[in-house]
Amino acid sequence: MPVFSHAAMLHGADYNPDQWLDYPDVLEADLELMEKAGVNCVSLGIFAWARLEPREGQYDFAWMREIVDKLRGRGVYTILATPTAAKPNWMSEKYEEVRRVDKNGRRDMSGGRHNHCYTSPVYREKTAKINAALAGEFGSHPGVILWHISNEYGGECYCPLCAEAFRAWLREKYGTLERLNHEWWSHFWSHTFTEWEHIHPPMPHGEMCINGHCLDWKRFVTRQTADFMKAEVAALREGGSALPVTANLMGFYNGLDYFKFAPLLDIVSWDNYPTWHDENPDELAVPAFTALTHDLMRGVGDGKPFLLMESTPSMTNWKPTSRPKRPGMHMLSSMQALAHGSDSVQYFQWRKSRGSCEKFHGAVVDHCGRSDHRVFTDVARLGARLQGLSAVTGSRVPARVALVYDWENRWALEGAQGPRNMGIHYLETLAEHHRPFWEMGINTDVRDMSGDISGYDLVIAPMLYMYRAGFARKLAAFTRGGGTLVGTYWSGVVNENDLCYLGPRPGEGMAEVFGVRAEEIDSLYDSQRNSFTYEGESYRLSELCELVATEGAEPLAVYGQDFYAGRPALTRCGHGKGTAYYIAAKPEARFLKAFYARLADTLNLRPPIVPAVPCGVELTRRKAEGGREYWFFQNFTREGISVELRFPLYNAETGEEASRAELKPYESGVYTDTAP
Amino acid sequence: MPVFSHAAMLHGADYNPDQWLDYPDVLEADLELMEKAGVNCVSLGIFAWARLEPREGQYDFAWMREIVDKLRGRGVYTILATPTAAKPNWMSEKYEEVRRVDKNGRRDMSGGRHNHCYTSPVYREKTAKINAALAGEFGSHPGVILWHISNEYGGECYCPLCAEAFRAWLREKYGTLERLNHEWWSHFWSHTFTEWEHIHPPMPHGEMCINGHCLDWKRFVTRQTADFMKAEVAALREGGSALPVTANLMGFYNGLDYFKFAPLLDIVSWDNYPTWHDENPDELAVPAFTALTHDLMRGVGDGKPFLLMESTPSMTNWKPTSRPKRPGMHMLSSMQALAHGSDSVQYFQWRKSRGSCEKFHGAVVDHCGRSDHRVFTDVARLGARLQGLSAVTGSRVPARVALVYDWENRWALEGAQGPRNMGIHYLETLAEHHRPFWEMGINTDVRDMSGDISGYDLVIAPMLYMYRAGFARKLAAFTRGGGTLVGTYWSGVVNENDLCYLGPRPGEGMAEVFGVRAEEIDSLYDSQRNSFTYEGESYRLSELCELVATEGAEPLAVYGQDFYAGRPALTRCGHGKGTAYYIAAKPEARFLKAFYARLADTLNLRPPIVPAVPCGVELTRRKAEGGREYWFFQNFTREGISVELRFPLYNAETGEEASRAELKPYESGVYTDTAP
Amino acid sequence: MPVFSHAAMLHGADYNPDQWLDYPDVLEADLELMEKAGVNCVSLGIFAWARLEPREGQYDFAWMREIVDKLRGRGVYTILATPTAAKPNWMSEKYEEVRRVDKNGRRDMSGGRHNHCYTSPVYREKTAKINAALAGEFGSHPGVILWHISNEYGGECYCPLCAEAFRAWLREKYGTLERLNHEWWSHFWSHTFTEWEHIHPPMPHGEMCINGHCLDWKRFVTRQTADFMKAEVAALREGGSALPVTANLMGFYNGLDYFKFAPLLDIVSWDNYPTWHDENPDELAVPAFTALTHDLMRGVGDGKPFLLMESTPSMTNWKPTSRPKRPGMHMLSSMQALAHGSDSVQYFQWRKSRGSCEKFHGAVVDHCGRSDHRVFTDVARLGARLQGLSAVTGSRVPARVALVYDWENRWALEGAQGPRNMGIHYLETLAEHHRPFWEMGINTDVRDMSGDISGYDLVIAPMLYMYRAGFARKLAAFTRGGGTLVGTYWSGVVNENDLCYLGPRPGEGMAEVFGVRAEEIDSLYDSQRNSFTYEGESYRLSELCELVATEGAEPLAVYGQDFYAGRPALTRCGHGKGTAYYIAAKPEARFLKAFYARLADTLNLRPPIVPAVPCGVELTRRKAEGGREYWFFQNFTREGISVELRFPLYNAETGEEASRAELKPYESGVYTDTAP
């Protein structure tokens, strides 16, 4: 497998000249403007199938070759897309099967995008042919550096072909219907299956009551989408290209388990669209959640650097409302990507299209085509800066803390009926556990249950409702070996197939590790509260309050209200050389800040270079192959901030030695430990 | 017809061993645990069709017989279900017609429950066969005491078979299309029917504008569901069983007219799931509404004792959120059922299922299987108490007040367009008229328009928009004969087929009885108010304010605002020996409390045993065959309350004489008039 | 083309005797009651197809002739409807194609109304036959004065016949697919069309992403509906009737471009249902918006008098809630129609139907049939008054101010994704620009982009996102010639086919006219604000704040907040002899009041007869053929108001000279400039 690496930070955009072939002046202007903007890389051909194969079997690659050549001539590399994210009309009209069927059983008409059937033999054949042809044409072109496989894979197809593939996958997984009926607990409501053919995808007017069935369907969707992607890549290889491949992911998108998906790629890339300047009075919520998402995307790529494949130079056009980035925010938000491990800043899109539904999405070049436009100059300023940060390329983001996030757990947790159907807030809870570390300047990895957690000092696993096979053993071993584990209410309830543990909860021996046994769970209405006191401070509890019996654990805090007042709400238990904390209820964020500050001190996790990280400053660390460290300071406030350094660092861009990091509003600085 | 009666309070749960046949240890443990919990009755086989008939025509009853025998050996009776509430997959896959068609014309796929076509000849045949076979096998078993017909009948089918049956029923009802066109007023918008075949069920993409058509469809759904149930019972009789039958109803469920349904049963049973501990600051709203629902369920069974067939020992899993019952609430809410005429406390469910969508619904036995679990011990405590209350079994709940609630009226009222489509609040209004009696400790019956009202002292008929044939005559006779009648705005508007009366309103002579003629109705927005003053106190009016002219009535209060200020808003009119009150607008609840307190004094309705019922205490009375009376005192507050008795009673459980009912928080006491 | 004119104000209602043919007494009573109510005109037969053609091809017009004759005998004219708004069941059951297909591809079942396929050859044939037959029977009847074509045309059909007609229309419009692909920008996402047959209507499960496609579909719906109406009229003409035609429109209804529709009619009529007495604390919002809608309806009829075809004598039954009109409001709201150019006051409906879904819609005659009912007497009072206002009939409503409202602009603007999908509020903005003139007593015309604007002094064109071909030239010429133009943010963004202008914005040279170039647009969340100061007063800005560069314009106000503080938010630019104002952000209504007050003074637009128009008084002017002027004063407040007159006028009803207009609460007065 080829591995992607590059000597400089990539900077560029999705480029859609296929919309502008009738406008040669525009195409010429693009080349000039790219140079002005400091662009060294574009993603090309993402929705160009109808231009590349205007009639079935008739390829026209000449226009694209001309563009790739011209770009190359200007020093602009091409990330070349396979065009499969949108089907040409001639294909969807001729071959019904390439169009998706929705969960209501209705087949799409032609139109839209991201809506092909990933099982369809016809679509796979058409894909294989054009991918191979593109690989033959461009797979060794010196201007092409990476394949961009399709676009933002997602969605589900419920057509008969997919249903059949689902059954085949189930048959392989379970072997017999007896086993399936047990694991799905389908004797419930007489849903016992006596023929494989009686199994359908979960659909609203059909079977939606078997949790294991719904869960397996989601697993199958990931499997089948990955299988389609594998076929795409195989066709490129057959076409003769050995170039590395990426696919642009979408952060916490719920439809695909990226931890299974990303290993098929040479490098992970993703599309990042935070809602900067929204009406949340907490202005740090957006950068904190964006940081978490970067950490996730780095995590699905096993910690390697990733690419920021899409971001907007200014505004989106698909949100309820969408504000332009204030001065400084484009630079700052782009630098945040680097700070978390990105080796690129790419945009959707280079130039605003003239018509159709994305014509008002932000772009480097606006309809007016001017290079003195505020958005363009912001981009150009960043382009120049990135050239000075080439040395950062390829460096890692080392972390001693892991946060466990798992798509299968999310599906099972959110798919269950009870205890709180009005909102169980898994992602919000994850974000609340991540934020104290973001505020303290402590790098954090995100791992799923298939990951290796043995090397961390601290593992945080909130709401781990489902224990996938083997993970409880890993957690126990981690703790026994000296690790610190934090778990919460509503953990260890079901096994990998969503069957409840019949013994103590958390199951699989974890009740012993935590020293607690969960007995009941109270599910509060939105206006209801409980509380506990921790280290002299009282904290609100809401939503879920679990009633646990301690069996070995020491209570650190107890409930303050209701009939379970006085029962443990926060516990600590020694296990082997390590320690396991159990947070039995959902606390306000303020508690997690205090709790993790204490843990950070105990475990000595704080960054050594500063006495403290001021509020609103994000501090992360990248580490290059040779050991050199880069400290990224980012000021997400509208005030200037001066951060004291414990020992002098060097500004990685200017080379100057510094005893303080001086940050203007929205400013970021990169510092390194050795003189450049 | 056999009539159900039993010498002791039933206590037990839905029992689903069909989910656990692979877990013999669990089944053994169940028997031990039932004994500990004081269980003497289970409902068995409710969703067991796939286990009872694993392949078409191949019955397997052995496992069930073994369980019934074992239960019998432990003194546990069985209520045996017909399994028709869920179809096995083999059946729904082979016979399309057994699957429902929804109102959008889409046929269900396999899956779910409560979704068979009640017209389908195939489903009726399969049902008849298995019911007869079950009757043959278990119909004389000494451990079986009652048939549980299907489960929670409900829903609608719009398939061609049902449409055809609907037409046949209409043809029988109306005879000619001329008559139908008149009664449906279908010359409106040229909807005149010229062929019977042109009539379809009301469907959103079809005809939804003819009120009479929509109303007849709802009547037909009740008729056809009842017809299906009759066929179920007939098959049991043909199979040789003479055991009584019940079906578990669902309170105010809007899809079926239980007053037509219940007479087909030997005993009514129902499933009760109040939202205890919700966020309504009025903590008494839930017990008051639950009391009303018990009264309704007793009413559909013509006042006879009923069974509480389902309730949760702790929490549900299908509401927006669901809280465990606080200590004491399980006992209290179960006793409330007895207080209103129940001869049982049964649960859904005995043991939490291990998988699928009900695995987190409360149960006597949790996944951990422990008998020291709080929920289990609460259940066991109640089990023990019920044994001491055997003497109450079979006693009646006598009432002198009747509240008129009628499903056909509800359908017509809520189905009309205008005067207040944003919410006309029929059920809320009923509850507001019921609550003063609940607070005063006055037993109340609920009757529909087919019922006999002649024996009551007071009849309350709020929002009786539709007068079913003959009911106005009953009301007039009741009043003329000395009864007190209370009616409200928006009454007597249409006749049984939803045609407006062309003369004075309320129609059919009731304008004369009330001494008022309704002229207009003002329909306020939510933020708008009017008011009136009654006995020196001012009360808010909202939502609907009718403008009436008095023609014989005496105004007791007049509107305070708007252009109709000074016009009558509350009137009284003598009619024969009786009196009719007309409340022309929707008053705040506080007014109804004052108004009915006055009436209760006038009619001497208050319970003689107490000087007053404290706020939060529910007081009801049951009366046994021999005349013995049981007074149920229930404290729904979180404070202790001591209720003074006018004359000494005997505690029905301890036998001690008492001059006060001492009630701890959430405590209930049963007192009787003669020493035990 | 015959032109409708009449010597007296029409007064009457939709009359549906077809519902009452079995009730001869009712029909007799109707004639008496009409006389009492001062009714001189009814609309007949609107939904009577099933009565007129009870079996296919068998017409029965006798009952209708009898009624028309009897009405004529009482001095009541008939507006005769073609019955096509509702299909008889015999037709929709026999001919599937007459039933519409919805956007989800589902064909309607029989039922409802306003749901025929306007393309269906069968429906067109049946329509042509009955229309011709009606024309033959009644087209020269002396009692019949006008044809009422169908009823409230609207809705869309997506059936294969319509899809085919859509393609034919596109082929005619674009000629080649190359042209279509460019204008639709359909190379975007590979949506390139290579066959005409691949084009479908925009449907949610198909293509919804091509703005030009969606826009053309809406244009086609207007075209096809108009085509159907033309065929209706042609059949009347073929049947021998030369009577004028109208169709009842629905104000700002979004489904049809009435500016294209109305020219096919001899006189515009419309149905007006304001929500009088709602909970908006600003009680003048409803009359102000109603005034705007009257102005629009007059505008689509090119300024000629129109007919108020439907209004309710009291309440509706189809709104969330619906209040009866307070005393005086019926008179006032009816006079408001006259004040804006109506030559009639007609109601839906004469008599409340007895059954079906409109039985509670307000009517002149209630179910009780009494003529002493408040609603009836209110109607009768108006009937008497209208007889005294015959001289007003036919007079015009002259205006010097035009507000540009354009359905195609609305479709394009609201159909775009971005910049503010949560609400861009075109209609609300129009209303805000109209209201200051309503408050100042200045007549205002509403024009679309096809209209002639050359004669006005002031043209206001808010949010003119799209410039239809040629309109920018008209605007520039208007300004150059001395006119005053007011434009706003988000104008001149796209051309007629929704393609963005690639040069400066507003496009087509309008940037030069305004002297500004729009660069970015900020789209605020609901809670966010900016501000500017104008003539010493500070005003809030919200929702949209455009960032413009001045190139010739003079800034009159600048932004007060955010990173664009200090940049121009309101500008003025001389152009030729005229002036162009550009309002770059959405201001609060208070600003528009101040701004337009200033302009009104500058341009001398205020009505000369009063020193000032008091708050809550509407003042409009009609001008008769001979030059006589009628000033309508209307008091929409609940207080009496006395308006000083600058010079004496004559009360047009009493003939008395007056130096003040004395208006009781809700009272209206008509004054004229010469003694009667």
Image (tube, coloured by chain):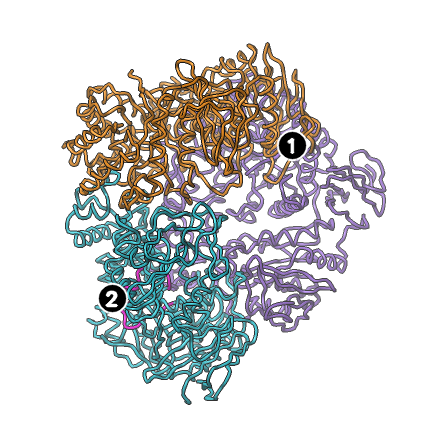
Chain colours: A orange, B purple, C cyan
Tell me the kind of residue under disc 2. Answer: Glu
Is the residue at mark 2 from the same chain as the one at mark 1? no
B143 with respect to A299 (left or right): right
Q: Is residue B215 above or below residue C203?
A: below
Observer-nearest of C420 and B6: C420
Q: Quadrant of the N terminus of chain A?
A: top left
Chain for numbered disc 2 = C
Say which quadrant the C terminus of chain A sits in.
Answer: top left
* Mark in the foreground, 2 or 1: 1
Q: Is residue C252 magenta?
A: yes
- Residue C404 point in image, percent of width and height: 34, 63
| Residue occupying the point 56% across, 49% down | B259
Q: Give the range drawn in magenta.
A: C251-270
Identify which residue is drawn at 27% across, 31% down.
A42
Q: Mark 2 points at which residue?
A: C232
Disc sitting over residue A539 in the figure: 1
- Distance of mark 2 from mark 1, alpha carbons? 74 Å
On the picture, is C428 further left or further right than A557?
Answer: left
Task: Specify few, some or many for label 1: CA neighbours under 10 Å numbering under 14, 14-19, or 20 or more.
Answer: some
The amino acid beneath tag 1 is: Tyr
Q: Chain ID for label 1?
A: A
